[in-house]
Image (cartoon, rainbow, N blue to C red):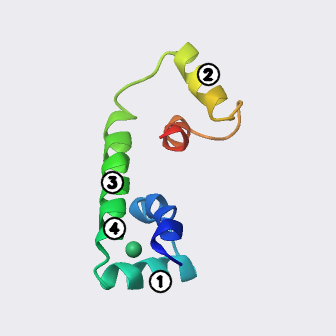
């Protein structure tokens, strides 16, 4: 995988849900000291920190929530608010 392909994985990596070959590959790549990927991972972690710290505290108005859900194509599914925000981010 190249940096561009790995970039998509870092959000999952930052959430700690990446595993198997993908995680091994991301780990190996980061261990080589790739500056581009280190930055991507840092960004993903920053986004997660913002989401995790703000999501439980701020209860969004139902109307806004529906709009965000609709904008990311989530319509009354099992997805949580944080997942919708993550998808929108
Ligand atoms: Zn890289």
Secondary structure of the residue carrying tag 1 is helix
Q: Confirm if mark 4 falls within 8 A of ligand 1.
A: yes
Question: Could you tell whether 15 is left or right of 84 in the image?
Answer: left
* Sooner in the amino-acid sequence: mark 4 or mark 3: 4
Is 39 placed left or right of 17 in the picture?
Answer: left
At mark 2, the secondary structure is helix
Q: What is the number of the mark on residue 66?
A: 2
- How far apart marks 1 and 4 lie (CA) works out to 18 Å
Q: Circle 4 sits on which residue?
A: 36
Q: Is residue 34 left or right of 62 when viewed as pictured?
A: left
Q: At 49% across and 43% down in the image, what residue appears?
A: 86
Give the x, y percent position of residue 79.
62, 41
Label whose residue precedes the other's in the sequence (2 or 3): 3
Instruction: Give the vertical position of 71 relative to 32 (above or below).
Output: above
- Would you name the residue on which mark 3 appears? 43
Quarter of the image for residue 43 reads bottom left
Comes first in the chain, label 3 or label 1: 1
């Amino acid at each position: 995988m190249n940096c561009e392909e790995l970039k998509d994985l870092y959000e999952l990596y930052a959430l700690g849900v990446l595993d198997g070959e993908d995680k091994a590959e991301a780990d190996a790549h980061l261990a080589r000291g790739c500056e581009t990927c280190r930055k991507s991972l840092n960004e993903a972690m920053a986004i997660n920190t913002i989401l995790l710290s703000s999501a439980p505290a701020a209860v969004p108005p139902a109307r806004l929530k529906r709009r965000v859900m609709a904008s990311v194509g989530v319509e009354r599914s099992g997805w949580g608010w944080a997942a919708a925000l993550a998808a929108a981010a």
